Image (cartoon, rainbow, N blue to C red):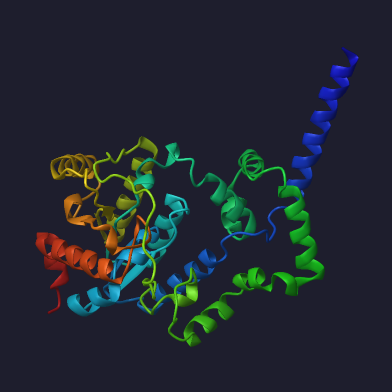
Amino acid sequence: MSYLKIFATSLLVIAFAYFSVSLLLAPAPISAEYWVREMTVVKRSIANHYQGQRKLIIAAGSNVLFSVDTDRLSRDLDIPVINYGLHAGLALDKILTEVASAAERNDTVILPLEREYYCEAEDSSNIIWRARNAIAWDHQRWQSWSTLERLEAISMSGPGLLFELALARIRATWFPRSIEDRLKTFRDKDILAEFTHSPRPSAFAYSAYHLDNLGNMQQIDGSYFTGRAASPEQKTEVCPGSFRTLQEFVRDMNRKGVSVYFANIPYVATSATRADRVEQASREFASAIAPLGTVLDDRNQLVFNRKYFFNTDLHLNSKGRTLRTKFLEDSMRKDPALNQWLNLGR
């Protein structure tokens, strides 16, 4: 029995030491998707460029980044349209905070949010991604977490995290050139200078420097999505926590004089897809969202042939983006209040 006590005590001591040292070392520049921070800096700069002008902001995760052409919308609508698509790994409140900072009185925001954002508390797929990126570069989020939340993030990042943290600290202190690609993402002025002078990309890459001047991802051809896709017939569950987050955002925007609309995301068509079931799912979603705002489009409009998708079932290629953008523009013009707003000052 004494051996069991010694063993249990040893485990507790090791665990206490592991988490204590990890908390002391974090945050640190471990491997993560630093390009997302660079992209956020660039998008803030684009929004600042249009500060004081009436504008349209289209925001969500990467489905907007790839699948909405705000350059075309800007030309067609004769107002600046900013692509504020970021990364679906980011938390809903993170995206909404970015939008709230960019939106001004008399602006309009459209949110074609990914399905997971409507029931974020129930979605575990992005928890590890968020934990690692908070430790690596999203220091504001890390600082906002309680000690318990930080411990949870450390535990989810795997047993090798302590070694990663220690190595990252050593490299940042004594060998910074070895992780210069990570460290440079904390220098906002350098990011914006590189973005300003970046040539048009010749091939696709997940990079903030592959965005155009309105925030659209460039060079999204040359690959075709071949994986399993989410069904367009699947119900979009709207959970209380996400609803409250969105409700607070809409109220804040309305007080600020900003209108908020919602829209659907693209879906891959299959031989088994039934239009009536898609329509039912679309109606149920619009009904659930109605207390927050209008859903501009119908899901059946956004069920595309697989050939129009790039590398995931949320990322359209250039041809797919053209179609999706046209449908969104048509939906905007059909909404009486939004159409009136679009024609103000003409």
Considering depth in this image, is 331 or 46 the residue closer to the camera?
331
- Would residue 109 be seen by someone viewing this image from the given angle? no
155 sits to left or right of 342: right
Query: Relative to residue 171, is residue 252 depicted above or below?
Result: above
At x 74%, y 71%, the residue is: 178
**Quarter-wise, where is residue 256 in the image?**
bottom left
Q: Quadrant of residue 85?
A: bottom left
* Number of numbered discs overlaid on the protein picture: 0
Q: Is residue 123 above or below residue 182?
A: above
Q: Residue at x 26, y 66 (%)?
A: 320
Judged left or right of residue 72, residue 9 is right
Q: Is residue 252 left or right of residue 191?
A: left
Closer-to-camera residue (307/20)? 307
Q: Position of residue 22 (x, y in %)?
A: 74, 47
x and y percent of residue 14 in the render?
A: 82, 35
Q: Quadrant of the C terminus?
A: bottom left
Res 77 → quadrant: bottom left
114 over 310 or under it: above or below = above
- 263, 179: nearer the viewer: 179
The one nearer the camera, 144 or 73, is 73
Decide if residue 195 is in sight here.
Answer: yes
Residue shown at 56% from the left, 53% from the top: 141
- Residue 52 x, y percent position in the rendering: 33, 76
Q: Position of residue 114 (x, y in %)?
A: 35, 51
Q: Quadrant of the N terminus?
A: top right
